[in-house]
Image (cartoon, rainbow, N blue to C red):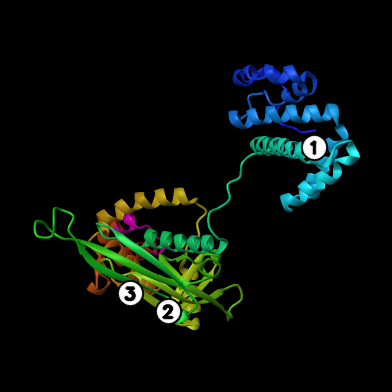
Amino acid sequence: MIFLGSRDAAAASPVLTSSLPKHIGRNGGPVARLSARLLANPPWYDQPLVDRALTALDTVARASAIRPGFLHAVAGLMRTHDGAKFSDLVKALRNAGPAHGLTKGAAEQEGRALVMALGVLQALKRRAQSALRPGHALPVGMPTDRLRARRVRRVEEVARALFRSAAHGTSCEVWLTDDPAAVGFTVSLGRVYPYGGRYKSYAAPSSSWTITVPQRWLSRVDCRELAVVDGLMTLDAQPLLSPVSGVEVYAATWAAQARGLDVRVERGVIARQGAVSYHGPDVARAVAGLTRKMSLTVRRSLSPDERAERRLRRLATFARRFGDEPVTLHDSEAVGNCSYGTRSWCCGVGIDPEAGATTLARVIEGYRERPQDEAWAVVLHVVNCCRLR
């Protein structure tokens, strides 16, 4: 009638076994058969609930031996009146008594006892079944709240991976908007006194980021693999009609590392074909820059690990022989790099893009810190120019 656990009574709990004799003594057959399923040391073991269940088994066993028809009638009435008022169930129990040789008062009294006993057994059955099934924890919060938290977490993760943080912490606040003009990235600088108090020690810099991206940033940017393009963080991207077959074109807003802890926001067009991309101020110049960049890109059959190891070996030779050679922004433009990405890379490795020129040794040092194919192309261009002199 009721499944309550394992059928193996040999592994019965000693605590439960010690409380059985008084119950089995009164109704040995039915109680012993049903109790065998209780005594397998279940994971849902609850002594008070099991004690109530054993008493309920006595009540059900007596009713099944004396008035089996009335017991089935009570069970049927419980199913019929499930969720209804208890007074309606009591009235139905009282009316069902005469058909089973009981007065209305006796039927009501015995029916109440059976309802309580069957309720206890049903509760024990639900406990056992829930313990036998693997548990599944539901996520906390509404789906919209969880989706918003995922968007915010992903935006912050990309920003912290790209931009410099203050020595004593950078807080990040992400806003989701439906206004394209509100998309941006602002940095607020501050001071903290972590060395013993404001009047006792030196101040340390701190910063705060406020990033505003579209509500659907995940689908508009991240799912298109545009979150990071050439070392720049894409804040928004809108597909445009491409003038060249096979080239993707996006009207975009992106953030680039500036001097120190600052971040600047640029608006323009991203052109992409395969793994090669180019940032430009408009569609024509972005596509032209992409074409030039792809024509200057040297394709090799080496794996990424082999290519990185080979480059590091060659960098040591380049730094020793050509380390004092000057490098300018024109060298980066000569190999097809966009000015936005070049300036962002320079600021990221501590090179001042407004200084006019730096040395090849300093560029190689920056490449070791932040390796990018665009920077490697600049190194090769300067070295080749030196060899042709």
Mark 3 residue type: His
- In contact (CB < 8 Å): disc 3 and disc 2: no
Give, as a single range, the part of the protein colored magenta: 366-374
Q: Nearer the viewer, mark 1 or mark 3?
A: 1
Separation (CA) of disc 1 from disc 3: 103 Å
x then y, percent, for residue 320: 25, 54
Q: Residue 369 colored magenta?
A: yes
Mark 1 residue type: Ala
Q: Which residue is mark 2?
A: 182
Mark 2 residue type: Ala
Residue at the farthest right position:
99
Nearer-N-terminus badge (2/1): 1
| Circle 1: element type | helix
> Is the residue 110 above or below the residue 17 in the image?
below
Q: Which residue is mark 1?
A: 106
Front-lying residue, 152 or 71:
71
Residue at the farthest left position:
200
> Is the residue 171 above or below the residue 247 in the image?
above
Judge from the rendering whether residue 225 lies leftward or rightward of residue 3; answer left or right: left
x then y, percent, for residue 248: 56, 73
x then y, percent, for residue 285: 46, 81
x then y, percent, for residue 212: 42, 72
Please name the residue shown 35% across and 58% down the image: 370
Q: Which residue is mark 3?
A: 330
